[in-house]
Image (cartoon, rainbow, N blue to C red):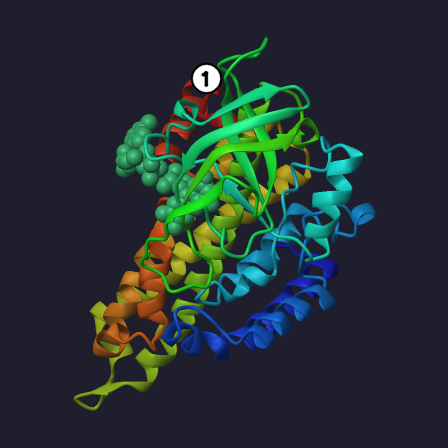
Amino acid sequence: MYGLSDEDLAIQSRARSFADELIPFEVQAEMDSGELPPDVTAGHAKRAQELGLHSTNMPTELGGGGCSMLQVVLVQEQMGRVTNALGWVAATPPSWLPPIATPYQLEQFVRPAIAGQREECYAITEEGAGSDVAGLQATARRDGEEYVLNGVKWHVTSYNSADFAFFQGVLADGPHAGEHAMFLVDLPSPGVTVLRNPAYSHTISHHHPIVEFADVRVPASHLIGAEGDGMTFAYEWFRFERLMVAARCLGAAERLTSEMTTFAKERQVSGRPISEFGTVAAMLADSLTELFAARSLVYETARGIDRGHDVKIAHAQCSMAKLYASEMAGRVADRAVQVFAGRGYMRENVAERFYRELRVERIWEGTSEVQRAIIAAQMTKRGPAVLA
Ligand SMILES: Cc1cc2nc3c(=O)[nH]c(=O)nc-3n(C[C@H](O)[C@H](O)[C@H](O)COP(=O)(O)OP(=O)(O)OC[C@H]3O[C@@H](n4cnc5c(N)ncnc54)[C@H](O)[C@@H]3O)c2cc1C
């Protein structure tokens, strides 16, 4: 199905087997605040590297997998079958960075990230600037051969395990004053402190603290691209990540659909499997139908990028993929809890965990409302026909 090549099927199968290796650790992670023993996590990270599932999106000349976008999607889809973010060991470092990174940045940040020796986090969102990234208040001021960064960033995912942060701020002075710039900040660095580490709905080892940057000095060599380029990079990151969110939602929905079907065939009520009750059967049928539609959309979006689609079309299609796949997965998780019923409310059940975990897929990397706004804007500018 889906016209996958032998090469596509091979990497998909490797990723699927790896996901099956991770699944038995889910409940342990769930019951232990998302944590597994460090040697187990290190073993998983090593396996991801050995299997060629880490950095699939990065160029081969830098040590990455050099995979097509469709293959990157196929791998992330399988990682999405696993709860508690255990699949995040098959990381996709920032693929927007190599084309514009300096030789110094390639050696210090990009190559080590691809090798799994360094990990990044993104410090963009602020209390008053989430959907409206353009409204950031954080500042970057040039001071000789350094920049001085100030601001308070919210929801900085993976800050607790990251070795460096992407910091986006508004240039305080100079020819590009008022425009955005992106910087690489080593972690830890003087002036970078966690103000608060709130608890979130999911149970994963990656935290999302509120982080203050107070007079943090970085060398000018840590500016990414040119002054004023900050928003361009943010958009490139969003486009890629939205497609990855969509891919992982496919995997989650597949796992849920499969597990609820097995349960519905086995569970007998009044001497009949519950799959024979029309209202239960409808939940199974709707879930698979929507998964099929979402998968077709996500794969075609990835193929369009591989064919070199116009970036604006790709941007709108990634929004459509994320919007539909994340909302589809949310509906499937809700139905799965209903099919499992009492069992589906237990944290040891995959449906309960995905029910909580998938909620954020409609929020991060741009909310569903923001995705709809992006799609509608492109429809009115270019006409619906070129987008779908
Ligand atoms: C678990 C988690 C991890 C995250 N990780 C990171 C991270 O690593 N780095 C990072 O920088 N950020 C991160 N974020 C932030 C995330 O990207 C933002 O939460 C998201 O973009 C929404 O912004 P907001 O929460 O400020 O919502 P708001 O912008 O306050 O939106 C509030 C409501 O208004 C609606 N709304 C806003 N604008 C529009 C519009 N134009 N049209 C219609 N409706 C609109 C929204 O859809 C929403 O319903 C993370 C968030 C979470 C929850």
Furthest-right residue in view? 61
User: In this orientation, does residue 367 appear?
Assistant: no
Observer-nearest of 232 and 110: 110
Please give the residue where the numbered disc 1 appears in the rendered image: 381
User: In this orientation, does residue 57 appear?
Assistant: yes
Q: Total marks drawn?
A: 1
Above or below: residue 326 compared with residue 24: above
For ligand 1, give the image quadrant.
Answer: top left
| Horizontal side, residue 160 vs residue 155: left or right | right
Observer-nearest of 218 and 70: 218
| Horizontal side, residue 164 vs residue 374: left or right | right
Q: Which of the 4 image quadrants contains residue 78?
A: bottom right
At 56% from the left and 70% from the top, the residue drawn is: 19
Q: Position of residue 378 (x, y in %)?
A: 45, 23
At 58% from the left and 32% from the top, the residue drawn is: 217
Pointer 1 local density, CA inside 10 Å: few below 14, some 14–19, many at least 20: few
Observer-nearest of 202 and 77: 202
At 50% from the left and 36% from the top, the residue drawn is: 317
Q: Position of residue 386 (x, y in %)?
A: 52, 26
Above or below: residue 180 compared with residue 174: below
Q: Position of residue 146 (x, y in %)?
A: 64, 26
Mark 1 CB lies closer than 8 A to ligand 1: no
* SS for dot 1: helix
Above or below: residue 286 compared with residue 210: below
Furthest-top residue in view? 175
Q: Amino acid at mark 1?
A: Lys
| Horizontal side, residue 350 vs residue 301: left or right | left
Above or below: residue 270 compared with residue 281: below
Q: Position of residue 273 (x, y in %)?
A: 27, 84
Observer-nearest of 329 and 31: 31
At 62% from the left and 70% from the top, the residue drawn is: 42
